[in-house]
Amino acid sequence: MTRFTTLLSPELIAQHTSSGAWPNRLLNDFLADDLAKTPDKVALIDSRQKLTYRELDRRVTRCAFGLLDMGLKAEDVMALQLPNWIEFIILHLAATRIGVVSALITPVSRNRELVHMLNLSEAKLIVIPDQFRQHDYRKMLFNLKAELPHVKHILVVGETLHANEMKWESFADYAWEKNQSLEQLEHLRPDANAVTEIVFTSGATGEPKGVMHTSNTIVAPQLALAQSLHLCADDVLHIASTIGHQTGFLNGVRLPLQLGATVVLQDVWRAEQMVEWIDQYRITVSSGSATFLLDLLRANNLAENDLSSLRLFRCGGGPIPRALLHEAREKLPQVSIHCGWGQSENAVVTLTRPGDTDEKLLSTDGRAQPGMQVRVVDAKHQPLTPDQEGRLQCAGPFMFVGYIKQTQLTQENFIGPWFDTGDLATLDLDGYVRITGRIKDIIIRGGENIPVKYVEDALYEDTRIQDAAIVAMPDPRLGERACAFVICREHQHLNLSDMQAFLSTRGIAKVYWPERLEIRATLPRTANGKIRKADLREELRKESQNTSKAH
């Protein structure tokens, strides 16, 4: 009997299998295709090493025996808290081959968050780096050991080893020498509808939830993405978003292998390094938040390198700011830029396409991917007419199969086949979605709803502003007022009067103007690069409480 309670039913499986959306293939099946076609092609590149498809397959096989030798079996959970290193991909493929579930944990996760995720998933093994960005992961795990009853093994990837520790590759080689029975691995092949991944929601609005996916639900969106953007095995993909989160995982781990392409993994974001790598490795496709694209365009060495191979950049997290698109066309005219919308629960659901007009590219988050459906509904879940704002819902083969250990919460988020995304949006006559905000982002000022996303989009048109987030601050008279947290561009300055004057020039109603401005050098972010508005709201709430106590 399965230990995971999911939404899967024979009817749902039959529906998506018969449509062709669920091909019933593991990622290892795509690796086998790649091995047969181009065994000596470079598959993976990171800051430390390169592997061909032949070498990757060999290491995956040995690693699978290593996991078995540890006592891991089907439906056991292996937590991966690694940077964008090749070992992450080897371990995920090895686990998938024998039915072990990969739980993705971002390298920035720390004590309380880490304990929550490991206990929620009941991970038996956690794989960590020895050191990354001056953080000692070994010490962190040692200090948390008493709070982690399910963790039986800690595997360390890196150069610095302590007494009685085995380097992760050594554990695999030792197990291989003892076994070498490939038939055993074939016998352990899991079903493509078994849970294969647990990814934790970013925590932007609260404690992370464990999102469960099967091989089918994460193969399907990448097949659709490749179709929509005309991606192929000849592409060289680049990813700087952490592969410990869904965006990086799908685009940096799953997509390249499904294509038979090459992927370049960047573990520490530095725009100048990306520029050098585009030239060196002839990178053709990259993706990330608009911040990545902005940094790339302003890299100090942009003019010194050949970036002619780069043909596509996919932005996530909202429509592309107009000024950014114009700057990209000036500096990288050959690059096609697209935006889309999705979540950990459903991958990329909407996407702009090659040939779309600037109006669609600049003012929408794209249209539904092949196989997916979207709709905008009112509070009673009745579909609204075009361009009316309401709750965004989606359905289709990309959908997750449930939140781990939260069956009731899973059910509460579905209305029949429709998943309530928690986003507010409009849907135009052509089927293009425009995300207008999060339901939890709404600021109610004296009974007036402030359209947060609408005002934020206007702020991004100000050339002095690099990043902005508007959140509610408590107010004793009006209930809430709007506070804008802003990062200014280099050598630029902004005050509250400047900001409000700019919003006036954009025709933003005065009642919508933020009434406080906080200039910051950085803003708290999720692993996926989204601003953690929950942290900013909490900061303002505590400040308000302290002020009240002082009076």
Image (spheres, rainbow, N blue to C red):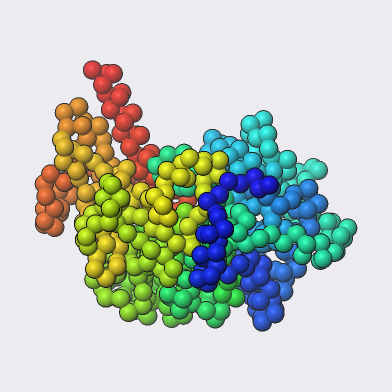
**From this viewpoint, is residue 66 visible?**
yes
Q: Is residue 222 above or below residue 71?
A: below
User: Which residue shows up at 24% across the image and 65% down it?
Assistant: 428
Q: Nearer the viewer, residue 103 or 107?
A: 103
Number of marks in picture = 0
Image location of residue 74, percent across then percent down: 71, 52
**Residue at 53% in and 70% down:** 18
Of 30 and 80, nearer the camera is: 30
Q: Residue at x 75, y 49 (%)?
A: 72
- Give the image location of residue 308, x and y in percent: 43, 81
* Quadrant of image for the C terminus: top left
> Horizontally, is 208 left or right of 362 in the view?
right
Q: Is residue 100 left or right of residue 205?
A: right
In the image, taking residue 271 as reference, residue 449 lies left or right, namely left
> Could one spot residue 522 in this view of the protein?
no
Q: In the picture shown, does residue 238 fall above or below 497?
A: below
Q: Residue at x 41, y 68 (%)?
A: 369
Residue 328, image x and y in percent? 33, 72
In the image, residue 6 above or below residue 478: below
Residue 221 on image: x %, y %: 49, 66
